[in-house]
Image (cartoon, rainbow, N blue to C red):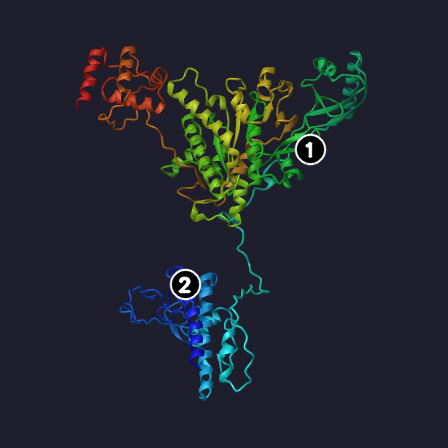
Amino acid sequence: MESQLKQKELYKESILNQVNEIRASSDDIGCPHCGQPVRKSWEWCPSCGHSLVDWCTFCGADIPRGEDECPECGMSRSGVVCPKCGTRNAGGFCRKCNEPLTLAAKKEQERALKDPQFVKAAELAVQAAELLARIEAEEQEVTGQESKEVELPEDVLRLKELLGKTTLRQSGSVAEPVEAPALRQAQGPERETPQPVAEPAEKSMEVVKGSKLSTEIKKELPRINVRDELPDYQFPSLELLDSYSSNRNEVSDEELVRNNNRIRNALENYKIQINDVKAIVGPTVTLYKVYPAPGVKIAEFKRIQEDLGMHLHARGVRVVTLTDSVGIEVANDHPSIVPMRAVLNDEAFRSSKAELPVAIGYTIQQKVKVFDLADAPHLLVAGATKQGKSVGLNVIVTSLLYAKHPSELKLVFIDPKMVEFSAYAHLLKHYLAVLPCNDEREERDNAIVKKADKADKILRSLCIEMDQRYELLSKASVPNIKTYNEKYRNRKLRPDEGHRFLPYIVTIIDEYADLTMSVGGSGDAKVVARSITTSIIRLAQKGRAAGLHVVLATQRPSVDVITGLIKTNFPTRIAFRVVSRTDSSTILDSPGAEKLIGKGDMLYYAGVEMERVQCAYIDSEEINRLNEYIGSQEGHNKSFNTPFYLPPVDDDTEEGSGGMVDMTKLDERFEEAAKLVVMSQRGSTSDLQRRLGMGYAKAGRVMDQLEAAGIVGPQEGSKPRQVFVSSLDELDQIIAAYKNQ
């Protein structure tokens, strides 16, 4: 009998040791009411429902340890009536039936059941209680006492119910646990049953239980829908755009036959044999596909390109090489307008899977030209004045407005002409991205960037935004913004770790040449021009993966404006009609743009081959209707009306700032700069930069110190500062005075 009890005690001790080991390996503590393992961060015990906090859940007053009632309101720890058993409770769980009484309690219980350490410890605690009940039942049987029904403690029953097991009421015949096979063998002599043959003691076996199958459907958290920020936003209707049905002209059969005969006659005069001619009619240009006879070289067609134009009595005649023929592009007698409404209504745009789809116009092959600005990834637009460049920019913006929700796209407009993009100020509270401003009026005034210094500031801010986005991409271990946003929508990125949805940012810059023009300007203007160019190149080099794209337009496609570095980083280009062959080569690296007929006739180049496209048309009235429709809807509300603020830019110390200058710590090159200014009798920051090799910020700080020392006067616009010191001896006295202070 003693050996049996000793063996039972040893088994009980082994289970309790496992429980203690689990508790010691975690941050678990014991519930003061039931002793079951709980976490320090929990407010209620998921086993018995006892409150684990030392404050009243009703009035918030502190409750001393060991006390059950609140000293302030007198409410006991059991003050909420359980709807299941009617017991009063103060915590989130019923202390009798363990029923969760609040949503937080339910979540606490669910979290506990998902904790493997808690589940393991709870299972071992139930096994230990069942073992004790079994020992007590068998002791009654051995000693001949009256067999009484043995019941597990209430806290164990609640814990067992929590684990999803059936409530067990113990009696004399209790099922044996699998963990104690030796226990049955030791009980043999005490029973009036034949003693079995002695067998070697079996070693205990660990049983790994698999997860139970369930038919209950578990609903996953829904994907994050970023459009919920503006749930009532309505995309603009195509009804806002004009159809221009009266401006659609058909090419007559007479015109086609006439041009066919003229082409054949001209080629026959130059002894160029052909087999057939086919015509593909476009809105402004008709492509005549000429099939040369065997042995005829394509160079012979290009050699007589100018002569073909004279024979056809047409301007804008181009000879292009096709896969199966030679194409001769001839302008129609009566060109047709391509309505913006028509290209947006086409299936090519409506069914496009592009991230940033742009329906730019209509091709000679009678197809709507749609390209993805996200894959471009940056666009260079050039053309002479009055040739459709500004309309092309409006077409690009309109396509994006019809394709992307305000939560998915932000726009930055830089307009040195000050009037071209003014209508888009209505998009302030929906689509525009601006720098933080001091008040609402300043925000509205800066919605469209119009000055070079403001353009420099916002472009530098975009570079900061780009760097911040790359940090987020690196933290999320994704290569680009598309994968990042998809991961964010699927709730795989935590906002509390700094992650956020990243909308695409498209920067449209008009009149780039005027923006960076520094000829004859001051030194500050040249610095700003270089800074603008540097920021644009940085955005073009790295912006694609971060979702920042640039559309750069200029009407002066010269080599000093469109440099080789610009062309390298802008692989996708659109050329409207230009003045000279040189300008065409600057934009497209090949001639052809000088042969265009103007009014939206353009060449689209994406690094492979050029494609002639008639740009869609949208006038100012349509643009105003579109922007007013979007602007009239409820938009984002942040500090003022702007949905998206770019990172602020810390301005370097500027010349003539008028702020307090610390003269106790003179710059190490102060004396050298002072001697240069006195000897040249010219106070200019640009001179310090050029002759002393200083940066703009450092030269500005030194010039401020020279002004504070009385060596030079204040800034007078773009003029050099006045120098008050005429000799080096006088200068030495001033410098010595500041060194000795």
Compared to residue 519, the image places residue 484 above or below, namely below
| Residue 83 visible in image | no
Q: Quadrant of the N terminus?
A: bottom left
Of the two numbered discs 1 and 2 in the rendering, the one whose residue sits closer to the viewer: 2
| Cα distance in 3D space between marks 1 and 2 | 74 Å
Question: Which residue is more in the foreground, 661 or 431?
Answer: 661
Q: Which mark is residue 21?
A: 2
For label 1, the crowd category at 10 Å Cα-Cα, with few meaning under 14, some 14 to 19 and many 20 or more, is some
Residue behind mark 1: 367
Element type where label 2 sits in the image:
helix
Q: Quadrant of the C terminus?
A: top left
Question: Which residue is more in the foreground, 593 or 150?
Answer: 150
Callout 2, which amino acid? Glu
* Residue 121: quadrant of the picture: bottom left
Please give the name of the residue rendered at 33% of the width and 25% of the height, measured from the top-left corner: 654
Measured as percent of width and height from the top left, residue 91 is found at 38, 68
Element type where label 1 sits in the image:
loop
For label 2, the crowd category at 10 Å Cα-Cα, with few meaning under 14, some 14 to 19 and many 20 or more, is few
| Residue 677 visible in image | yes
